[in-house]
Amino acid sequence: MAIETLLDFRSPDTCKRLVIKIGSNLLVDGEGRLRTEWLRTVVLEVKTARDRGQEVVIVSSGAIALGAAKMGIEGGGRSTLSEAQACAAVGQIALASAWSDLLAEQDLLAAQMLLTLDDFESRRRYLNASATFDRLLSEGVVPVVNENDTIAVSEIRFGDNDRLAARVAQACTADGVILLTDVDGLYDRHPNEPGAERLSQVRGVTDEIHAMASAESGSSVGTGGMTSKLLAAEIAERAGIALAIMNGSEDVPMSRALAANSATLFLPKRGDSARKAWIGGRLRFAGSITVDQGCVDALRENKSLLAAGITGVEGKFERGDVIPVHAPDGRMIAKGVVEYEWHEVEVIKGRSGIELRTILGYAPRAAVIHRDHLVML
Ligand SMILES: Nc1ncnc2c1ncn2[C@@H]1O[C@H](COP(=O)(O)OP(=O)(O)O)[C@@H](O)[C@H]1O
Ligand SMILES: N[C@@H](CCC(=O)OP(=O)(O)O)C(=O)O
């Protein structure tokens, strides 16, 4: 069966668990008011999906924009971090209450989950979040997720909710993610440019695909533009999850886009194991290593990463950390769990296996990164 036919976002057989992400520019109008009537139509679609036997997780932006309007702060409330955090604190309570009320109208129970980047980077917290999603979904509840903006400072922040949605999808082992935004998909150049054409399908987010997108948002309240959606698509494709970008501006947006076949679908590349998908989705690193071309070739043949191929060590990682591996041209080609501390790698880099015992003074480990804990990008 062709892979495309496996990806019906409306079918509980092919898409049992669905994550729907709604951008700020859809949730609030030009005056910063919640678009309640429109949201009601989205909730209707959620109800229809639930009735079909699908499980739905919502990732909802909009807290900062809503809070700014409530506090009378002009410009969307993002002038400083403290302003954004204060706006988020005010806006989130209104946002959660709106979701709770609208879902209740359809006899659906809402749950709020506020998460930070760190909750996904620490394996223990990631598994905790996964377990909570599982439990909520098995109870028939609809989790409504946002970034915990009030405490997330820049280093531990997604900033955009696109990557948050992809990480949520991974954590709850979803089959599909829909990013609802103000444009009907990825265009081959900025959609305002003459001659821009929408791609209906993307198989692999390559450099060429990245070059089509800009990080500029289409509105004063959105963040990350198309760039953050492509980063989300990369996380999803590696985790074996289909992702679609759809225009959410009109009522019942998903039914419209699916009926008209107007969206960009990113096909999943492969289904890594849950642990490998977690490794591949990591975004923060204490350090990294650079390897020679021979090592790059070996890794592509599914071999482990050995000290002999390492040419450089950057940063101060510890044993057990997930670190990126760079090719000689600086491109990140893999991520994996490192078996040594940074200073040990510094002394064993470029050395062959038989030398390692003498250099280290103890029996060396099988590899610097074992292939079972390595994910090629
Ligand atoms: N190649 C592209 N294709 C489509 N949209 C693009 C592209 N490059 C930049 N964009 C911009 O990305 C915007 C969507 O991102 P953003 O405003 O951050 O939305 P959201 O708040 O829904 O996350 C579009 O309105 C468009 O202006
Ligand atoms: N967490 C933030 C949303 C971040 C953001 O702007 O995301 P998006 O509108 O999806 O680009 C909020 O609730 O305001």
Image: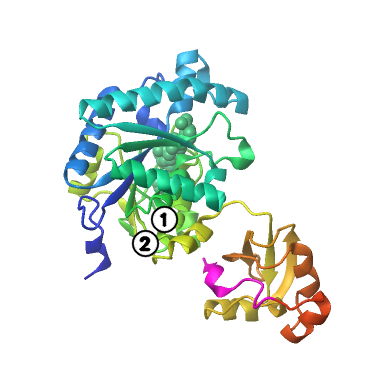
> Is residue 193 in sight in this rendering?
no
Q: Classify the position of the N terminus by image quarter.
A: bottom left
Where is residue 314, by image quadrant?
bottom right
Mark 1, residues whose alpha carbon is within 10 Å: few (<14), some, or many (≥20)?
Answer: many
Could you say whether the residue bearing mark 1 is in a helix, strand or loop?
Answer: helix
| Mark 1 lies on residue | 236
Q: Is residue 28 above or below residue 295?
A: above
| Mark 2 lies on residue | 268
Whole-Å distance between the Cαs marked 1 and 2?
7 Å
| Span shown in magenta | 365-377
Q: Position of residue 214 (x, y in %)?
A: 49, 46
Type of amino acid under label 1: Ala
> Is residue 208 in sight in this rendering?
yes
Residue at x 43% of width, y 65% of height: 273
User: Is the C-beta separation of discs 1 and 2 under 8 Å?
Assistant: yes
> 354 left or right of 337?
right
Q: Is residue 3 above or below residue 116?
A: below
Q: Position of residue 116 (x, y in %)?
A: 53, 40
Query: Does the Cβ of the disc 2 residue fall within 8 Å of ligand 1?
Result: no
Residue at x 36% of width, y 62% of height: 268
> 211 left or right of 251?
right
